[in-house]
Amino acid sequence: MTERLTYTAPETARLLGISRGAAYEGVASGEIPSIRIGRRLLVPRAAFNRLLDLKDANDQEPRS
């Protein structure tokens, strides 16, 4: 079976451990990358993974 290339906003919320509303707010603000296909709002898996990698890198940088 092939891995899915996108997540829905509720799936993204579950993966991030946030509320569904917070996921939609993150998409609206551009904080969570998304694409719209017709009426569907989708979060590309590759962009989601880059977002998490970026967050991890920022958390590991020493703060002055």
Image: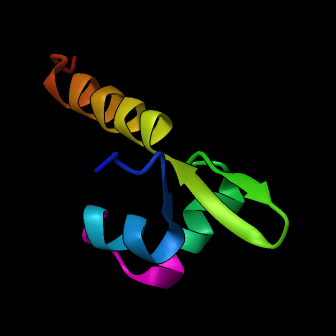
Residue 53 to residue 13: above or below: above
Residue 35, image x and y in percent?
A: 71, 50
Picture residue at 28% right of the left edge, 51% below the top: 1
Q: Residue furthest right?
A: 38
Residue 60 relative to residue 44: left or right = left
**Residue 15: within the magenta?**
no
Does the stretch in magenta take in 17?
Answer: yes
Is residue 30 shown left or right of residue 43?
right
Where residue 39 appears, as percent x and y from the top left, is: 81, 73
The residue under the point 27% across, 63% down is 15
Q: Position of residue 37 (x, y in %)?
A: 79, 58
Q: Quadrant of residue 28?
A: bottom right
Q: Give the residues drawn in magenta, as a range.
A: 16-22
Q: How is the image coloured?
A: rainbow
* Residue found at x 20% / y 21%: 63
Residue at x-position 68% and y-position 65%: 41
Q: Indicate whether 1 appears above or below 39.
A: above
Q: State the residue in front, 62 or 41.
A: 41
Residue 64 percent location from the top left of the image: 22, 17
Q: Is residue 20 above or below residue 52?
A: below
Residue 25 appears left or right of 61: right
Q: Nearer the viewer, residue 55 or 43?
A: 43
In front here: 28 or 60? 28
**Left or right: where does residue 57 sit relative to residue 24?**
left
Q: Where 6 sits versus 64, above or below?
A: below
Please count the marks in the image: 0
- Considering every residue shown, the one lying at the far front of the view is 1
